[in-house]
Image (spheres, rainbow, N blue to C red):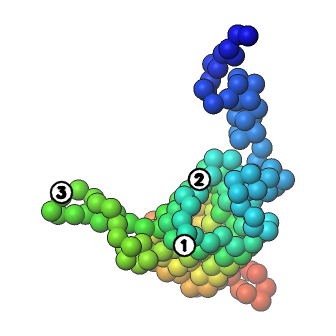
Amino acid sequence: MAEEKHTYSPDFTDEEFEKFCKFMHQTDTAAYGFARAKALGYDIEGLSIAPGVIISRNPRMSIGKFVRLGLYTYVSGATKIGDHVLIGPHCSIAGGNHKFNAEKGWFADRSEKDQLETSIEIGEGSWLCSNVVVVAGVKVGKCNLICAGAVVTKDTEDYAIMAGVPAKKIGYIDKETGEYIYGK
């Protein structure tokens, strides 16, 4: 019996690899997002994971119900994502920092204490648009709208609309009507 040739990968037959690639890169629908979450071992109601998402598993990480993680998003560290959160494509939520070690002359590993102090929290009902970065140690308030490309370096109030680098409050969401109020 001839050994099957593996053009693309030693772990998959060519047919398996092609199917896998198509599934990963042509399937950004809710149904596939839910299936992807289950296939990755997450049993969280309503969790949808788009293609290319990387979740660095951490025992201090928690992901709420009805969360959508957009294309190519990265989540790591002691991160808490509340219920009903939308995270757009290409976002980075990286809890934890590396500290410069003057004795060694480079950025060294972080301590347990550093990891606790650099956790991230994304408040319930928030929406992080495309390319948002939330840095270590930040708490994003409840029902925030974080505009595309923003870099959130400080805690935010509930119902805030944040934009820019670094992100600044440019408005708020009226919690009674849902209206976006800019400039206040």
Real-space CA distance between mark 3 and mark 1, rounded to the nearest whole angstrom: 30 Å
Q: Quadrant of the C terminus?
A: bottom right
Where is residue 113? Give x, y as percent.
37, 77
Looking at the image, is 33 positioned above or below residue 21?
A: below
Residue at which label 1 appears? 60
Residue in the foreground of this view, choosing between 3 and 57? 3
Where is residue 32? Give x, y as percent.
80, 50
- Precedes in sequence: disc 3 or disc 1: 1
Q: Considering the numbered disc 3 on the image, is that residue within a helix, a strand or a loop?
A: loop
Q: Which mark is residue 48?
A: none
Q: Which mark is residue 105?
A: 3
Real-space CA distance between mark 2 and mark 1, rounded to the nearest whole angstrom: 16 Å
- The kind of residue on which mark 2 rests is Ile
Left or right side of 158 for 16? right
Q: Considering the numbered disc 1 on the image, is that residue within a helix, a strand or a loop?
A: loop
- The kind of residue on which mark 3 rests is Gly
Q: Quadrant of residue 147?
A: bottom right
Circle 1 packing at 10 Å, graded few (<14), some (14-19), many (20+), is few
Q: Residue at x 70, y 10 (%)?
A: 2
Circle 2 packing at 10 Å, graded few (<14), some (14-19), many (20+), is some
Looking at the image, is 80 positioned above or below residue 129?
A: below
Q: Which mark is residue 54?
A: 2
Q: Is residue 153 visible?
A: no
- Precedes in sequence: disc 2 or disc 1: 2
